[in-house]
Image (spheres, helix red, strand yellow):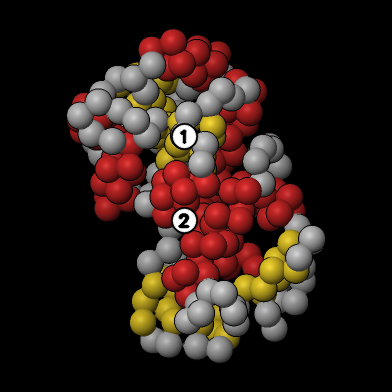
Amino acid sequence: MKKVLLIEDDLDIAELERDYLQLNGYHTEIVQDGAAGLKRATSGQFDIVVVDLMLPQVSGYDIIREIRKQQEIPVIVVSAKNEDIDKIRGLDLGADDYLTKPFSPAEFMARIKSHLKRYERLKGSAVGQEVILHKGLEINTGSRQVFVNGKEVQLTTKEYEILFFLASHPSIVFTKERLMEAIWGNEYYGDTSTIAVHIYKVRKKIEADPVNPVYIETIWGTGYRFIP
């Protein structure tokens, strides 16, 4: 049984999330303050963490940062903070997804299932190495390392998956919806602005000038492509 940690100080929301998770067969634990949440989240006992940003004692941002120092499990932010800057900050620290309150329980469950399935596929994938080389960019699929001009770049799981997917299909233009389906899975639906935020973050890390990219190009009104 998959184990889900909910770090949420609003008990009504936490219990709603727990009820839906338990109905779908997930073992669920609720923690209502950031300090206890951080301790549980880094215990290595959970398959996925759902975290609010505004928490007593320790913020959700700090929890995400500490999780990413130790683990690559999926982390989903559920927050009332709906500004782009909040989403960018949460995703930049390593969160895999961002869901804004109020939210649909059906969408919440779809995202949980999608991220867990994706994580299981990644863990079970073959270790065989392949290297993609392009204009100073090196993607090692075996070690999941990315280098730009010989210097390693640290990408989150979703950042790596987006970059690898696009680089594996050079010249092909993908809509945001198609990228969501490819990276998050068929069960995912929701705010496609998540893709734009992740692309923004990848460009910041691999492009010398993110405003004039040489790797990932925006096709206005359509989507994105890896520049051949």
Q: Say which mark, if any, is on residue 144.
A: none
- x%, y% of residue 92? 42, 54
Q: Residue at x 30, y 21 (%)?
A: 31
Q: Is residue 198 above or below residue 191?
A: below
Quarter of the image where the C terminus is located: bottom right
Quarter of the image where the N terminus is located: top left
| Tag nearer the camera, 2 or 1 | 1
Q: Is residue 156 above or below residue 98?
A: below
Residues at circles 2 and 1 in contact by the CB criterion of under 8 Å: no
Q: Residue at x 62, y 73 (%)?
A: 216
Q: Say which mark, if any, is on residue 157.
A: 2
Q: Amino acid at mark 1?
A: Lys
User: As drawn, which residue projects farthest toward the right?
Assistant: 221
Q: Residue at x 23, y 34 (%)?
A: 58
Tell me if I can see residue 142 in this picture. no
- Secondary structure of residue under mark 1: loop
Question: 150 or 222, which is in the foreground?
Answer: 222
Tell me if I can see residue 227 in this picture. yes
Mark 2 and mark 1: Cα distance apart in space: 23 Å
Q: Residue at x 36, y 82 (%)?
A: 151
- Secondary structure of residue under mark 2: helix
Marks 2 and 1, the one that precedes in the sequence = 1
- x%, y% of residue 3? 40, 27
How many C-alpha atoms fall within 10 Å of the one at disc 1: few (<14), some, or many (≥20)?
some
- x%, y% of residue 36? 21, 26
- The residue that disc 1 covers is 81
Q: Quadrant of residue 220?
A: bottom right
Question: 82 or 42, which is in the foreground?
Answer: 82
